Image (spheres, rainbow, N blue to C red):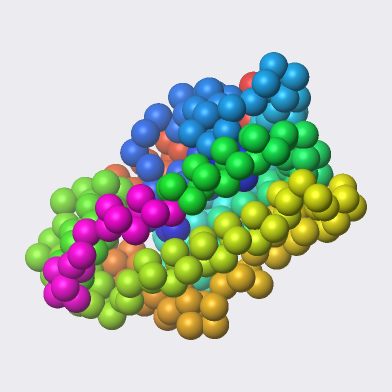
Amino acid sequence: MLSKFSKATKSLTVAACSVLLTGCSFSFVYNHLDWWANWYLDDYVTLNKTQQKVFDEIFNELHVWHRETQMTIYAEQLKQLKADLAAGITEEKAKEHLGKTNEYWIVVREKAKTDLIELTHMLSEKQRKELLANLDKQNKERIENREELSREEWVKEECKEQQSQFKSWVGKLSKSQKADICEATGKLQSTFTHWMGYRMAWHNSFTDALDVSLSKEEYVALFAELISEPEKLISDEYISLREQNNRVFVGLFTEVMNGLSQKQTNRLNNKIDDFIEDIEDLAQDS
């Protein structure tokens, strides 16, 4: 509900911080992140044996660090979320919970940055071209595969998606809840074009960073900025739209959560408790 080298490392946080979004077995996904990471990686570049060994060592160390230091933080946030919901959650608190997932990703991103830079610098010119070509291919496929919908059709699809997300957590929705969700969805704005503009800008900057004629110092400086400050490539209009959509969703989340029936509340609490138990068990396995 509360919402590839780089993607490989990001999968750690995606798995951990999307506990309020996914219906998959969280423990299973988390315990097999090494497989998921390599599966994502294979879509982008083929590593030689030496590079693969380095990648596996880096990822395993990151995974252990994450399990030992971050999982309990996520469990504590879920406990706080449960308490805030029980007290009647405010928009301020809902916004705070939403923001924390991005903070968690930043922590992992910065932890992985140095090793990530070293690993990508090991790529040959051929591998760099392969990586860039696959990233470009993915961007083009996203654009080509995007279903062109009218504003009315897009809002209808988004309404169904939001209803599905809430339903997966609280159970069957009432007619008024469904109506409230659709009304709020009508205030959202599609950010696909802006998001793709950001992805293309990042790809262009990444292409510059992978230029084999650059010294390692130049490479490190460029890539470090791409990892730590990608927001510089995001347009002001995109930022504005995201903030607007976040406000709409925070308002919707607060309204729905504060209007749950007892049955819905019990279901939600049980699901949150299950996630807390899973996360704490994973932390104890470290």
Give residue 24's quadrant in the image. top left
Q: Position of residue 155 (x, y in %)?
A: 20, 70
Residue at (69% x, 16% y) in the render: 49
| Relative to 163, 19 lies left or right | right
| Relative to 171, 130 lies left or right | right
Q: Which residues are magenta?
A: 139-154
| Relative to 147, 131 lies left or right | right
Check the picture and name the quadrant holding the N terminus: bottom left
Residue at (16% x, 73% y) in the render: 150
Q: Position of residue 65 (x, y in %)?
A: 74, 34
Q: Is residue 90 above or below residue 45?
A: below
Check the picture and name the quadrant holding the C terminus: top right
Q: Nearer the viewer, residue 171 or 5?
A: 5
Give residue 103's quadrant in the image. bottom right
Q: Residue furthest left?
A: 175
Residue 254 in view of the camera: no
Q: Nearer the viewer, residue 63 or 44?
A: 44
Residue 2 in view of the camera: yes
Residue at (66% x, 72% y) in the render: 232
Magenta span main SS: helix
Give residue 99's quadrant in the image. bottom right
Q: Is residue 13 above or below residue 207?
A: above
- Tell me if residue 27 is in the magenta stretch: no
Q: Nearer the viewer, residue 77 or 140?
A: 140
Q: Is residue 55 above or below residue 224?
A: above
